[in-house]
Image (cartoon, helix red, strand yellow):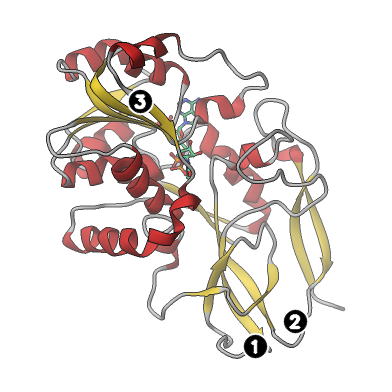
Amino acid sequence: MTQQNRQWRLRARPDAVAKESDFELHSEPMPVPEDGQFLARTRLLSFEPAMRGWMEDRPNYIPPVGLGDVMRGIAVSEVVESRVEGYAPGDLVTGMTGWQEFSVGGAGTRRLDPGTDPKAILSVLGLTGMTAYFGLLEVGAAKEGDTVVVSGAAGATGSVVGQIARVKGCRVVGIAGGPEKCRWLTEEARFDAAIDYKNEDIGERLSALCPEGIDVFFDNVGGAALDAALARIARGARVVICGAVERYSMSELPPGPANYINLMIQRARMEGFVVLDHAARFGEATAALEGWVKSGDLVWQVDIQKGFENVPKTLLRLYTGANQGKQLLEV
Ligand code: NAP
């Protein structure tokens, strides 16, 4: 019997919270590499909160995934057969190969250097780390002495943002869900303070912890956290819109933040960004992040689920906060 390639395809567009039934498991014959191609087996899949946006048919920074198409996703895969120079069985490669067990690739696919940790490539040394680096230092222009507040702080991106800010001499406050995530932030990631938004009033705590106001608010969440931060920005503050995970489970877009007028009063700016626009400088960010990991200044966490059958379930963990660090799955 021909070996099969299992795939998770998009069956329905989410109307509010994404559901397992928005995806269907499909099986088709394994692809056969042609001259100039290699066949690779997916080893490790990466999950991004933005995937909920990719499932929707509305304007975004990349086109929506088509109904019936293999769900888009970044992975590390292992070459199992090669008909292209420069790639040999056993090599690890990475790219946007989607939710499937096998894929074909060709010259130009990124090959990992031997000894590279695939988990790091999909998190702290991958797009997650790049997002934190450029969002905080370029868009947020964080500098020594600033008070930096991060929402989604215990997540993959937020935790790196806060630690870079600490290394740069900022005072760092993180907002995260639950006592364990807040403990991790202050004890292991060495944030100055953490606010447990599930059990504490964000506004009251921000007022107490940032009496001089917030210089940089790095927002992964939107909604109540954004509004509370806007009410407390300092003169010349930078509000960085990285993501809005709170809205990823809503069918209707919520009204904008009530406190936006503070941007005018405080001569502040609010700016969104897409990490891919900084690709030309990824080398610089990688070198800096590698250095901080090596020196122990930057700790990182991954949350690894297992089994191809659990792929849709694993995505949903991001929207309930079940993940503790970068969400990955070993296929
Ligand atoms: P992550 O933070 O590791 O995981 C998502 C976290 O969001 C969850 O662990 C949960 O943490 C929090 N969350 C979920 N639902 C929430 C809600 N209703 N209210 C408040 N918090 C909620 O994921 P990530 O990959 O690092 O992504 C973080 C953000 O960065 C996302 O908004 C993503 O879209 C954005 N991003 C942007 C770019 C860019 O180029 N702009 C690139 C990559 C990622 P708690 O347990 O603390 O609630």
N-term-proximal mark, 1 vs 3: 1
User: Residue 217: image x %, image y %?
Assistant: 32, 28
Where does residue 14 sit, x and y in percent of width and height? Answer: 72, 32
Q: CA distance from mark 1 to mark 3?
A: 49 Å
Amino acid at circle 3: Arg
The amino acid type found where label 2 is placed reads Pro
The reply to whether discs 1 and 2 touch (Cβ–Cβ < 8 Å) is: yes
Rendered residue at 21%/64% (across/down): 294
**Where in the figure is residue 35, as x and y percent of width and height?**
74, 88
Q: Is residue 48 above or below residue 256?
A: below
Sequence-earlier tag: 1 or 2: 2
Q: CA distance from mark 2 to mark 3?
A: 50 Å
Query: In the figure, residue 215 lies in which quadrant?
Result: top left
Quarter of the image holding residue 271?
A: top left
User: Please, is residue 77 above or below residue 210 in the view?
Assistant: below
Q: Nearer the viewer, residue 85 or 303?
A: 85
Closer to the observer: label 1 or label 3? 3
Q: Is residue 159 visible?
A: no
At mark 3, the secondary structure is strand
**How far across and how far down the image is residue 291, in percent?**
22, 63
Classify mark 1: residues with Cα within 10 Å, few (<14), some (14-19) or many (20+): some
Q: Which of the numbered marks, if any, corresponds to residue 84?
A: 1
Q: Quadrant of the N terminus?
A: bottom right
Label 2, residues with CA under 10 Å away: few <14, some 14-19, many ≥20: some
Label ID, residue 269? 3
**Which residue bears the numbered disc 2?**
33
**Distance of label 1 from label 2 (alpha carbons):** 9 Å
- Position of 27 with respect to 44 (left or right) is right
Closer to viewer: mark 2 or mark 3: 3
- Residue behind label 3 places its C-beta within 8 angstroms of ligand 1: no
Q: Amino acid at mark 1?
A: Val
